[in-house]
Image (cartoon, grey):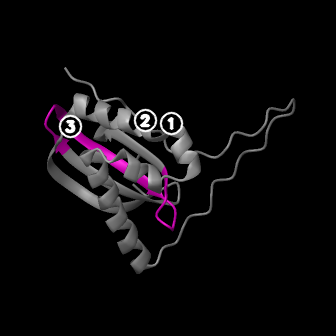
């Protein structure tokens, strides 16, 4: 049985508060982003482009649209390339696109790409790009559908 790593890139998270001797106050969730229909259309198109780049092996192009924190978390172009290779080795290539849509995760726009893959027949695989309003990638994930974090409101 082939396994797909539960998460190849972790979603960007808020910075961890400095350790103190007193209990830390809970970190407030970011305010939900509200997009215009034009912004939703733009981010959907960008998500499709980023997914196409990912499967075409264009790590340099993807690195150029990752925000600084996400690029560091992904370990630069070399890390993105390694993740591309890992997906290719473990899941193969997409054979049937099931869903492409803009959703929200923790109040942030998220492009959701769900497909069947040539070497991973257990279930669909989901590729997610969490973006800011400008279209920079601030988080990402690749999971079997059962392990993908649910979008907001689902």
Residue 39 in magenta? no
- Can see residue 140? yes
Task: Write down the quadrant of residue 3 in the picture.
Answer: top left
What span is in magenta? 116-138
**In the rendered view, would you say 42 is above or below 110?**
below
Q: Nearer the viewer, mark 2 or mark 3?
A: 2
- Residue beneath label 2, please? 78
Label 3–label 1 contact, CB within 8 A? no
Label number found at residue 123: 3
Q: Residue furthest top?
A: 1
Q: Nearer the viewer, mark 3 or mark 1?
A: 1
- Upstream in the sequence, badge 2 or badge 3? 2
- Residue beneath label 1, please? 75
Figure disc tally: 3
- Upstream in the sequence, badge 3 or badge 1? 1
Q: Residue at x 43, y 46 (%)?
A: 140
Q: Residue at x 35, y 73 (%)?
A: 41
Toward the viewer: 91 or 101? 91
Q: Is residue 96 left or right of residue 81?
A: left
Q: Residue at x 26, y 54 (%)?
A: 52
- What's the distance in space between the residues labelled 1 and 2, CA to CA? 7 Å
Residue 150 horizontal/vertical position (percent): 40, 48
Looking at the rendered structure, the secondary structure element under dot 2 is helix
Q: Main secondary structure of the magenta part?
A: strand
- What's the distance in space between the residues labelled 3 and 1, CA to CA? 28 Å
Residue 10 horizontal/vertical position (percent): 48, 39
Looking at the rendered structure, the secondary structure element under dot 3 is strand
């Amino acid at each position: 049985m082939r396994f797909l790593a539960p998460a190849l890139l972790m979603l960007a998270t808020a910075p961890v508060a400095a350790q103190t001797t007193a209990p830390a106050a809970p970190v407030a969730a970011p305010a939900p982003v509200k997009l215009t229909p034009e912004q939703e259309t733009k981010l959907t198109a960008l998500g499709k482009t980023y997914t196409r780049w990912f499967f075409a092996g264009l790590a340099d192009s993807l690195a150029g649209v990752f925000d600084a924190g996400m690029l560091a978390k992904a370990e630069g172009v070399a890390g993105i390339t390694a993740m591309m290779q890992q997906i290719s080795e473990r899941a193969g290539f997409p054979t049937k696109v099931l869903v492409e849509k803009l959703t929200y995760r923790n109040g942030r726009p998220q492009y959701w790409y769900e497909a069947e893959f040539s070497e991973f027949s257990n279930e669909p695989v989901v590729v997610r790009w969490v973006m800011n309003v400008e279209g920079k990638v601030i988080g990402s994930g690749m999971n079997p559908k059962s392990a993908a974090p649910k979008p907001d409101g689902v």
